[in-house]
Image (cartoon, grey):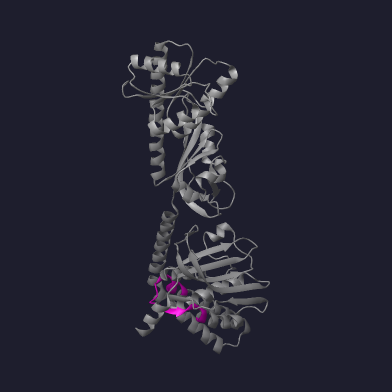
């Protein structure tokens, strides 16, 4: 071991330098080199990469021993041992900044030199093993699929792996030193209020804390992600809590799949129910409507006429509801084709102008270039009509209804509680209003069958369910933005079709 150890001696007195070299040879160290000034010491250290440097503090030239040691320390990972006759407090304080592995005052005994060298080498090897262990640990954390954030005992972020950077949209450099609640910000699922930080709870209580099920991770840009994970305290050498580690993963896609499965199961149940009763129910309603019509035609009793009229109105609504129920619960046979969304929207907006109130201003915005999508034109008309009529109903006292067609090239996914729109090229259909808007609790349920906020008898709760079904059939995605008093905006992202696809479809 001694023979393989490379030692650099830095001493401007040639006699002393040779004496140190001879002592080292007698002690069994054979590979030594001598530098007589600070500049030479730095150059020789870069060339020979010594295992240890024996450095005199007082050196001739523009670099003293401490300055030379600092440069070597920055470029070569070699332990420094100072050999000097100078023990002034200021000099010792300066020397400490280079984190030396030993400090011997002249004159020293050969055995003291040997002990100091061996202790310095041992300490250096231990530190190198620790650094390697830390590198491996950091590499493992970086390569983990799960996101990891660590913070110190004060809650300041110390580390983030790439998965955590991606989910939170914070870079590790920007996040380091910030409060963990700012970087790992969670909010309640029902509102925007910040939830209790599991990291702070883990630090305070000294035990692991799971991330609550009904919370969402708020990204730096304001997006929301469904996440699961936990915060675990990190204990120091004395047993106290020295920090916290948060391990979490994005469950948005999983949650959305669960929601779609529940919705599918619910619609399947509705479909079975509708199929089982619709035929007989429609027959019964037809009988009621027929007898009611005869009463209206044959009686002259005003009271009976009024009651019969109300029965017929209720019967007509029941028949309409039965038809809507069947339409939603059974997947219709659609005929998708590539067409220009601008034309369909333009034609339908002319019809809408005659339906909506004169107190509502209808605005249409379409691009100059074709907006080609693949869908069933009849279903797209149904989507636009349902969204427009819902918007009209939310503006009882007037307002503005805006229908927009546009394009959007997504470089990153759009994520909401119920939908993820993947990166890609899209044609947009957006319907927005200046109406009453919706609170978060309502937003959670708008696509549920039979859920409606309209007055009794004015809504079936199937319109948006049908819209959602059609959007799914088109392999499109829909984002909903709304807040009480701030209106609502429904934006549908249709995969954009090319002119070549349109031409090929036209020739087929």
Name the residue: 48% across, 48% down: 165
- Say whether residue 275 is visible: yes
Identify which residue, 474 or 508, lies in the foreground. Answer: 508
| 376 shown above or below 39 | below
Q: Nearer the viewer, residue 98 or 375?
A: 98
Residues drawn in magenta: 324-343
Residue 31 on the magenta span: no
So how many labels did they put on this image?
0
Q: Quadrant of the C terminus?
A: bottom left
Give the image quarter of residue 260. Answer: bottom left
The image position of residue 62, as x and y in percent, is 55, 29
Which quadrant of the figure has residue 295? bottom right
Name of the residue lying farthest toward the bottom = 298
Between 50 and 338, the residue placed more toward the observer is 50
Quarter containing the N terminus: top left
Expressed as whole percent of the image width and height from the top left, the position of residue 297 reads 55, 89
């Amino acid at each position: 071991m001694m023979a393989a150890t490379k030692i650099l001696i830095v001493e401007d007195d040639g006699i002393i330098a040779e004496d140190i070299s001879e002592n080292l040879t007698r002690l069994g160290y054979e590979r030594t080199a001598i530098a007589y000034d600070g500049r030479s010491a730095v150059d020789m250290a870069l060339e020979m990469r010594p295992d240890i440097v024996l450095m005199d503090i007082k050196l001739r030239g523009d670099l003293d021993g401490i300055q030379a040691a600092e440069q070597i320390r920055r470029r070569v990972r070699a332990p420094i041992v100072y050999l000097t006759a100078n023990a002034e407090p200021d000099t010792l304080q300066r020397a400490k900044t280079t984190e030396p592995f030993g400090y011997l005052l002249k004159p020293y005994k050969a055995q003291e030199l040997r002990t100091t060298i061996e202790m310095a080498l041992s300490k250096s090897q231990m530190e190198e093993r620790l650094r390697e262990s830390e590198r491996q640990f950091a590499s493992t954390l970086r390569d983990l699929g799960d996101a990891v954030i660590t913070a110190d005992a004060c809650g300041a972020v110390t580390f983030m792996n790439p998965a955590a950077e991606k989910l939170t949209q914070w870079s590790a450099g920007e996040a380091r030193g910030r409060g963990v609640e700012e970087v790992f910000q969670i909010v309640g699922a029902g509102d925007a209020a910040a939830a209790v930080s599991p990291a702070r709870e883990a630090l305070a209580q000294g035990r692991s804390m799971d991330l609550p099920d009904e919370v969402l991770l708020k990204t730096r840009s304001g997006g929301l992600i469904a996440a699961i994970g936990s915060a675990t305290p990190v204990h120091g050498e004395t047993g106290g809590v020295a920090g916290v580690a948060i391990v979490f993963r994005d469950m948005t896609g999983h949650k959305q799949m669960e929601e779609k499965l529940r919705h599918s199961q619910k619609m399947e149940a509705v479909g079975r129910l509708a199929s089982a009763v619709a035929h007989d129910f429609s027959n019964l309603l037809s009988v009621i409507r027929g007898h009611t019509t005869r009463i209206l035609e044959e009686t002259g009793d005003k009271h009976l006429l009024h009651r019969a009229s109300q029965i017929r109105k209720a019967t007509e609504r029941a028949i309409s509801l039965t038809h809507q129920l069947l339409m939603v619960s059974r997947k219709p046979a659609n005929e998708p084709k590539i067409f220009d969304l601008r034309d369909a929207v333009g034609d339908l907006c002319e019809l809408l102008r005659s339906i909506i109130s004169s107190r509502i201003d209808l605005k249409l915005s379409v691009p100059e270039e074709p907006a080609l999508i693949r869908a069933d034109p009849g279903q797209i008309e149904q989507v636009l009509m349902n969204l427009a009529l819902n918007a009209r109903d939310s503006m009882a006292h007037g307002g503005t209804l805006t229908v927009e067609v546009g394009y959007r090239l997504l470089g990153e996914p759009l994520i909401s509680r119920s939908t993820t729109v993947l990166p890609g090229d899209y044609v947009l259909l957006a319907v927005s209003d200046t109406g009453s808007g919706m609170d978060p609790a309502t937003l959670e349920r708008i696509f549920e069958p039979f859920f409606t906020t309209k007055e009794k008898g004015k809504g079936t709760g199937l319109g948006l369910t049908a819209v959602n079904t059609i959007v799914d059939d088109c392999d499109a995605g829909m984002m909903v933005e709304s807040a009480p008093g701030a209106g609502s905006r429904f934006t549908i992202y249709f995969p954009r079709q090319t002119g070549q696809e349109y031409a090929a479809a036209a020739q087929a």
